[in-house]
Amino acid sequence: WLSLYMTSFPTVSVINGHSPAGGCLFAMSCDYRVMVGPNYSIGLNETKLGIVAPKWFQDTMVAVIGQRKAEVSLTTGKMYTTDEALQIGLVDESLPDADSALKKGTQFLNNFQKISPWAYKMTKEISRQPTIQWLIDNKQKDLDFVIKYMQSPIVQKNLELYLQSLKK
């Protein structure tokens, strides 16, 4: 995740399927997000599974959609439709098909042909530094918390129920 979030290259995520949890984090880590069609959803839905999204997931969402919208989204586990995601800024574009989404993503990347790579890299690094620094400073603590929490009986039961619901 750190490699994607801090890459010195501009990044685009073309979302052509449902993007819960890690899929949403992956998309939010990119500089530009294009979502295909009205039939998909995106969001950090961990709370619906009885899981607490790690701080760096939460910080990434706050950076993309703002504190209040992120707080509501995170505490409710809200999955947004394509249109809702566009309205709150979780995605930058909504297009009807993958081809047009890829073209839009390419257009976005072309904007950087005349931008100094150094200026781009430093600007991105400065704006994302608080989240990165927190994770670097607390990596082991975060890992220990996630492992302990994910192994708790209640979380394991919630995950089991969720996986069973997918089979239906």
Image (cartoon, rainbow, N blue to C red):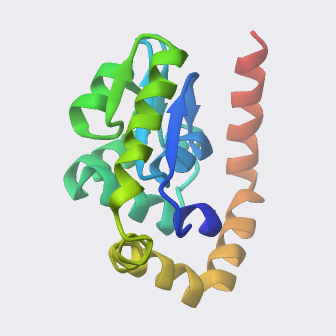
Q: Locate the C terminus by quadrant.
A: top right
User: Which residue is at a point 53% across and 62% down the rendered structure image?
Assistant: 9
Q: In the visual, does 89 lie left or right of 107? A: left
Q: Give the x, y percent position of residue 21.
A: 57, 43
User: Which residue is at a point 53% across and 29% down the rendered structure image?
Assistant: 15
Is residue 12 or residue 132 the one in the foreground?
12
Q: Give the x, y percent position of residue 126.
A: 35, 80
Is residue 128 or residue 100 the one in the foreground?
100
Q: Is residue 126 above or below residue 124?
A: below
Q: Give the x, y percent position of residue 165.
A: 70, 19
Is residue 44 or residue 63 the one in the foreground?
63
Q: Give the x, y percent position of residue 83.
A: 30, 20
Q: Based on the displayed image, in which of its 4 quarters is residue 85 positioned?
A: top left
Q: Is residue 79 visible?
A: no
Q: Locate the N terminus by quadrant.
A: bottom right
Question: In the image as oriented, which residue stretches furthest toward the front?
Answer: 114
Q: Is residue 123 visible?
A: yes
Is residue 129 or residue 57 the one in the foreground?
129
What is the number of callouts on the image?
0
Q: Based on the displayed image, in which of its 4 quarters is residue 80 positioned?
A: top left
Q: Is residue 29 above or below residue 161?
A: below
User: Which residue is at a point 37% across and 71% down the rendered structure image?
Assistant: 116
User: Which residue is at a point 79% across and 15% down the rendered structure image?
Assistant: 167
